[in-house]
Amino acid sequence: MGNSVLNEKRRFIWLLTLLLVTAFLATSGISYKVAHDSLSQQVEQNTLPLTSDNIYSEIQQDLLRPIFISSLMAQDTFVRDWTLAREQDPDKLVRYLKEIQERYGTVTSFFVSEASRNYYHSSGILKKIQDTNPQDAWYFRVRSLPESEPYEINIDADTADRSKTTVFVNYKVFDFEGRFIGVTGVGLAVEKVKALIELYQQRYNRVVYFCDREGDITLSGPGYRGQASLQHTYGLDKLATRILTSPSGNFSYEREGKTVYLNSRLVPEFKWFLIVEQEESQGEQELLNTFWGNMGLSLVVTLGILLIANMTLGRYQRRLEHMASTDKLTGTANRQVFEEYFDQALLQAKANSSALSILLLDIDHFKQINDTHGHSMGDLVLKTVASLIQDTLLDDEILCRWGGEEFLLLTHQDMVQASERAELLRERIANRRLKVNGHDIDIRVSIGVAQFEYQESADNLIKRADIALYQAKDSGRDRVVLNHP
């Protein structure tokens, strides 16, 4: 296809792109402006407490599960019996911890014995707990909890992998007479908890985070913009005492010139406060998100239309290219395309000193077939021969209709391989019979083979193959003749 046709195609695609983008921008922009103006006239507070209730219900399902698992482990008869039996066969407990971890999908499970101070993990015995090691302070803190608090939740580095931060549920274990014998529990990846918080934020379009009873932020999602504690966050510093002394409450404060509505609720199992925030312009943000969503959808539609248009034009382009580069009757390459490929193959053969040969085939007694059975049968013979050869082509070979009943095959093979190939083609064609009006038509071909010699011209190579072809015809046809330089 010429450059003019290609340029026309590009201009059409660009014009279509411009029209579609302009239309979608205008439609989405007008819709956004109308909705924005309407929203600006009637901004109202959403039902934040109801949202908080919904999130709290989901937390009951998602985050309280590790507490339940730790409670089961602490009351498990096997754990207590094994500990009281002086911790014989540690592999049994390790298998138990591994089974807990795999069954419930926790990132870790552990047990620390008060008697031996061994830290048992699902992967084995990791260490001995020592009161002089600051990293083991959590154990002694849990051991000292009052009877009314059988467990503790804390965020710390995993003992098995210090590079990972984990939400631990540490549960005290007592023997059958109520004596303290150790601490067991499981861990939940902080990333997983944060992912849950992010899910809540996306689902309800609110800012969600947790703080402990001292006001320190324990977990938060990407939408949180405050400091590490309520007391150090502007606006919240004046509400911190009221929030931390109330099991639940609704509050509001100013931040960057906007009113922020806040709902807090104590999650007693975690001893943390769940805090859900919403700015008064939340509806505007939702509208903006919708606008960008529409723009994204518009982009997808635009790309789809452009893809279909490009595929349609490309299909016509390929048809034109095919018509311009192939022989209409046989589907083989025409001489113009062949000569371009031939020149490249010669340069490659010269540069790499690689083998290159040509096979020049001529259909024997073709004029007689035309005269006896008509040109339609002659065309069928040409197509049949072309198809039989094309079925054997390798990836780097090309077949060209060289003349009326002549075909030229270019192959990256040496003389020996090319001659064997020529003989196989001759036999393959000879074995094919055409039946017309009850008469069998035998197809025979004569083939001349020549191998490219270094610094030889393309014309000379073809001339040598042509000489070999005439020698094959003069020798009785239906044979292969080689031309050695």
Image (cartoon, grey):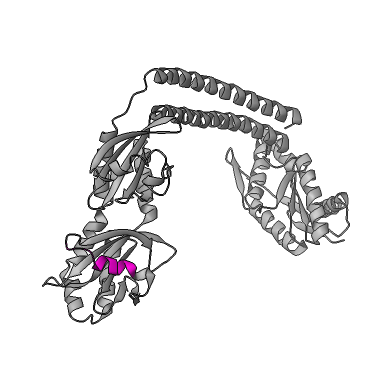
Magenta stretch, main secondary structure class: helix
Indicate the position of residue 290 as horizontal and vertical percent values.
43, 29
| Quadrant, the N terminus | top right
Q: Residue 170, located in which quarter of the rendered image? A: bottom left
Q: Is residue 142 inside the magenta stretch?
A: yes
The answer to whether residue 133 is above or below residue 246 is below
Of residue 345 and residue 136, the one placed in the foreground of this image is: 136
The answer to whether residue 400 is above or below residue 250 is below
Residue at image point 32% right, 51% down: 214
Residue at image point 35% right, 72% down: 123
Indicate the position of residue 303 as horizontal and vertical percent values.
55, 32
One can see residue 197 in this view: yes
Of residue 136 and residue 1, the one placed in the foreground of this image is: 136
Of residue 73 and residue 278, the one placed in the foreground of this image is: 278
How many numbered circles are shown? 0
| Quadrant, the C terminus | bottom right
**What span is colored magenta in the figure?**
137-147
Indicate the position of residue 108 as horizontal and vertical percent values.
33, 64
Q: Residue furthest left?
A: 177
One can see residue 105 in this view: no
The answer to whether residue 444 is above or below residue 83 is above
Taking the image as shown, residue 128 lies to the left or right of residue 363, namely left
Q: Is residue 221 inside the magenta stretch?
A: no
Taking the image as shown, residue 177 lies to the left or right of residue 94, namely left
Indicate the position of residue 270 as horizontal and vertical percent values.
26, 53
Of residue 268 and residue 168, the one placed in the foreground of this image is: 268
